[in-house]
Amino acid sequence: MTLTATLNDSELLRRVRAELEWNPRVNAKEIAATVKDGIVTLTGFADTFGTKQAAIDAVHQISGVRDVADEVQARWPGGKKTDPEIAQAVRAALVWDVFVPDERIRSTVSNGWVTLEGEVDRWQQREDAGRCVERLAAVRGVTNRIEIKPLAVDTGKIRTSIEEALKRRAEREARRIRITCFDGGVVALAGKVDSWAEKNAVEQLALYTPGVNRVTNEIQVDPYT
């Protein structure tokens, strides 16, 4: 490891600790972090799966972080809930979320772990369903198997839509990203960005574009250049 990388790891660790302490969704006292070559390892405990995911998401947003290794354990607050109780809570969450087509989604609960299945039109609907369930207090984890069945859209229109959305948000990133569209709503991304957060933001933007079914993200993260 070079001296520059060592100094960057030290600075990254400082930023990670500061972010975890600042984030109101995270109990920083129960989570420890280490950094090596830009990769952050989180250990410790979280009160729920949702707060555990909040810690991971928070670290991913820090400039310079390449990847996050998750070794945080989620605990049940206030005693273990039964799977039928959790299933009822999951269904209620899906029904009450205005962005989720609940009638097209089914769930299975086993030992506190929720598996979601079904079909939706857009990636954002899939993400919204997973997000509203993972924040339930008794849920230990979520496996999201919901499939996207988008309406047929011309690949040229998909690419143009993604390029225009990128330009609206960050002209610099738009110039550095290569977009290739294939039949079936498949999009391939390539290029180079400064942080994992930028890479993730570009991928999410592409996924939320109407007509996109799957994204292959080959964008490289290189915070040291």
Image (cartoon, grey):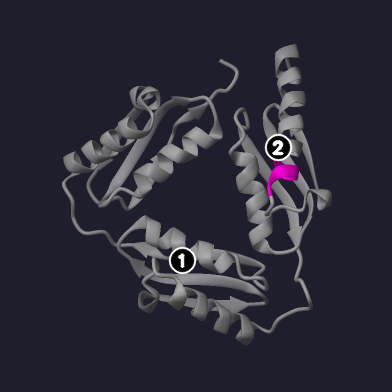
- Residue 70 in percent (x, y) is at 69, 48
Q: Is residue 204 left or right of residue 81?
A: left
Residue under the point 60% across and 30% down: 63
- Residue 37 in percent (x, y) is at 70, 26
Q: Does 85 appear above or below 201?
A: below
Can residue 144 be seen here?
no
- Residue 64 in percent (x, y) is at 62, 27
Q: Is residue 217 left or right of residue 195?
A: left
- Residue 181 in percent (x, y) is at 26, 39
Q: Does 104 appear above or below 193?
A: below
Dominant SS type (magenta): helix
Q: Is residue 65 magenta?
A: no
Q: Which residues are magenta?
A: 19-23
Q: Does 75 appear above or below 67?
A: below
Rendered image quadrant of residue 133: bottom right
Name the residue that disc number 1 marks.
Answer: 129
The kind of secondary structure element at disc 2 is strand
Q: Is residue 50 left or right of residue 119?
A: right
Name the residue that disc number 2 marks.
Answer: 40
Residue under the point 45% across and 58% down: 127
Residue under the point 77% across and 25% down: 10
Q: Is residue 22 magenta?
A: yes
Rendered image quadrant of residue 7: top right
Measure the alpha-carbon separation of dots 2 and 1.
28 Å
- The quadrant of the rendering that contains the C terminus is top right
The kind of secondary structure element at disc 1 is helix
Q: Callout 1 environment at 10 Å: few (<14), some (14 to 19), or many (20+)?
A: many
Amino acid at dot 1: Ala
Foreground of the two, 99 or 158:
99
Q: Callout 2 environment at 10 Å: few (<14), some (14 to 19), or many (20+)?
A: many
